[in-house]
Amino acid sequence: MDAIVGAQGVMHTVVENWCIGCALCLPPCPVDCIAMVPARRPWTPALKAAAARRAAARKVRESNRYPAFDARQAVAAVLSRKR
């Protein structure tokens, strides 16, 4: 999904060089305008490595965006406010 760029309320586009054909973009597309077409070039080890780097960077970004949630700590905080 890192191959899709855009902002809410404006047209998005696919960065063809980054698309790996995973089709994860299809279900969330609100206007059903994405067509999966055959790749124009072969999947090479260099492309695979680049995709792996982007995926790892995305995981880091997401983990920083949504810190780990400790349910026990959250329940304890709510209970302490009730007392």
Image (cartoon, rainbow, N blue to C red):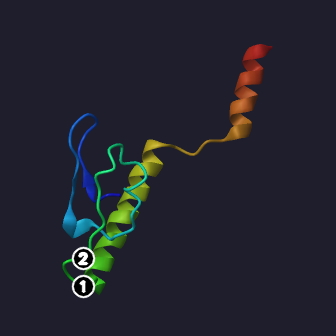
Q: Residue furthest top?
A: 83
In the displayed structure, 27 sits above or below 21; it is above
Q: Quadrant of residue 37?
A: bottom left
User: What residue appears at the point 70 percent right and 35 percent down from the top-left corner?
Assistant: 73
Amino acid type, residue under disc 1 in the picture: Pro
Mark 1: secondary structure: loop
Residue 42 is labelled as 1
Q: Is residue 69 left or right of residue 67?
A: right
Q: Is residue 15 left or right of residue 20?
A: left
Mark 2 sits on what residue? 39
User: What residue appears at the point 33 percent right and 69 percent down from the top-left corner?
Assistant: 53
Amino acid type, residue under disc 2 in the picture: Ala
Disc 1 crowd rating (10 Å Cα; few below 14, some 14-19, many 20+) is few
User: What residue appears at the point 21 percent right and 37 percent down from the top-left corner?
Assistant: 10
Residue in front for this viewpoint, 46 or 17: 17
Question: Pointer 2 and pointer 1: residues touching (CB < 8 Å)?
Answer: yes
In the displayed structure, 25 sits above or below 80; it is below
Q: Where is residue 80 drawn, in percent x and y?
A: 76, 20
Counting labels gives 2
